[in-house]
Image: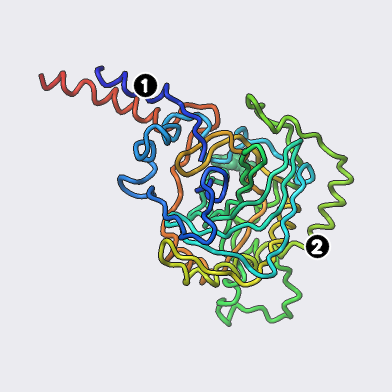
Amino acid sequence: MGRFPSVLLIVASVTQVLSLCSHNTFLHPRAEGGAVEVKTFGYVGNIGPLFWATLEVPANSVCATGTRQSPIDMREGTFNMIPASDLSIEIPDFPAGTEFENLGTTVEIIGKGGELKFGDKTFTFQQAHFHLPSEHLDNGTTRAMEMHAVWQSENQEIAVIGTYIDIAIEGAAAVAPIATAPTEPPAAAPPAEVGAAVAPAYATEGVVEAVGLPAPVQVQERSWLGRFRRRSEAKKQQQQKRQEVAAPPSTAASAFLETIFSKVGEIATPGTVTETPPLVISEVVNLWKAGSFQGYSGSLTTPPCSEGVHWLVSTQTLRVSAATFFKVRDVLGFNSRITQNAPGKINVMAEAAMKALTLAVPLPAAAA
Ligand SMILES: *[C@@H]1O[C@H](CO)[C@@H](O)[C@H](O)[C@H]1NC(C)=O
C-alpha cells in the first residue's frame, strides 16, 4: 500500500499549464525565420504517451491526471452534433503557398490568417498538422490519418478541427482487372455507387446527416456547445446545397492534400522546412461546411496535454491516393496518442496505474 499515496498525489496535482497541437500558438510561438523546433517527446518506448507526464514535471502532469483528455473514441454520448451552419469558417487560399515543416513528431503547414467563429468566440487559424493513424476513433474505428487544423482566440483559447483522412477509392478502380472493367461509358457509374461497392465502410458516411441531428445527448458540465442556437433548417439546407456543389466527390483524393504531400519527401528529416505550391484550402473549408461537427471539450493530444480545447471533429472525410499515403507514412511513421477515456471519466493512465498497483502490492507481502 506504500506506493498508493504517490499515485494519488499525482492524480491530485492537476495543473492547467497550457502549451504540438500547440505549435505556432501562444503556447509554442514559432520562431520567425528560425530553425524548426524538433520535439523531444515521442510515440514509442520511454518517450511515448505512457511516459509523457514524466518527461516534464509538473508541466505535463495533466497528461496522466486530466479527466477531459484527447483523443477519444467518438461514440454517441461523448459529443454533441453541431451543424456546420452554427459556425462561421473562412480561410484564405495560399496563392503563394506556405511553409511545410517537419517537427519530428508531425508535419505541419503554417497558417496565414483565417477565422473561425462560434457563439461569441473568434479564433484565428494557426497551423494544420497530421497524425497517422487517426487519433480520434470514428465510433470505434481508426482511419488512415487525421488532420488537425489548430485555431487560437485572442484570449488564448484553442479550438481544433479534426478531419479524418482515408485512402481515395479512384485508385482501386484504376487498377481493377480489365476483365471486370465496365463495358458501358464511365458516366453510367456515379462515383458514390462505385465507392459503396468497392468499400462498404464508406457508405456509413453521411448517415449522420441523413438521420438528422440528434438532440444533444449528454450535456457536459461547462459545455460551450450549449450556447449554440440552431438556425432555421431551411437556411441550413440551402447553405449546404450551395456548398455541396463546391465539395469534391466523396471518394476522390483531395487536391489540397495531394499538393501539400507532393513535398513531404523534401522534409523527411526532422527539423527541415520547405514551401508548398499554391494551396486551395477552400476545398477543405467547403467540405467542412457540407457536413457537421462532433464537438466536445477535450485536450491537446500532445504534451503538455492542456485541457479546455474546443474539439470539432468533422463528419466529412478527406482522401489521399494510396501512393501519397505510403509517402506520408514513410515520413510520419506512427504519431497517434493512446485513446483516452470518455470526457469526465477518470484519466486512463491514472486508472491503469491504480489497477496495476492492486496487483503489485500483494507481491512483496507474499515474498516476505
Ligand atoms: C457504432 O458502433 C456500434 C457497435 O459498436 C453500433 O451498434 C452503432 O450503430 C454505431 N453507431 C453509428 C452511428 O454508426
Residue visible at 67% across and 35% down? 80
Q: Quadrant of ligand 1?
A: top right
Mark 1 secondary-structure assignment: helix
Q: Which residue is mark 1?
A: 9
User: 32 or 227, which is in the foreground?
Assistant: 32
Q: Earlier in the sequence, mark 2 or mark 1?
A: 1
Mark 2 secondary-structure assignment: helix
Amino acid type at mark 2: Val
**How many numbered marks appear?**
2
Please tell me the numbered disc located at residue 325: none
Residue visible at 49% across and 33% down? 17
x, y (%) of residue 210? 75, 47
Q: Quadrant of residue 222?
A: top right
x, y (%) of residue 145? 53, 56
Q: Which residue is mark 2?
A: 245
x, y (%) of residue 92? 73, 60
User: 107 or 157, which is in the foreground?
Assistant: 157
Residue visible at 45% across and 45% down? 337
Residue count near mark 1 (Cα–Cα under 10 Å), binned few <14, some 14–19, many ≥20: few
x, y (%) of residue 179? 58, 81
Q: Is residue 262 above or below residue 145?
A: below
Residue count near mark 2 (Cα–Cα under 10 Å), binned few <14, some 14–19, many ≥20: few
Q: State which mark lies toward you, 2 or 1.
A: 1
Q: Assign the N terminus to one quadrant of the image.
A: top left
User: 320 or 204, which is in the foreground?
Assistant: 320
Amino acid type at mark 1: Leu
**Could you tell me how far apart the alpha carbons at marks 2 and 1 are, in whole angstroms?**
55 Å
Residue visible at 46% across and 60% down? 35
Q: Is residue 72 visible?
A: no
Q: Is mark 1 within 8 Å of ligand 1?
A: no
Q: Is mark 2 within 8 Å of ligand 1?
A: no
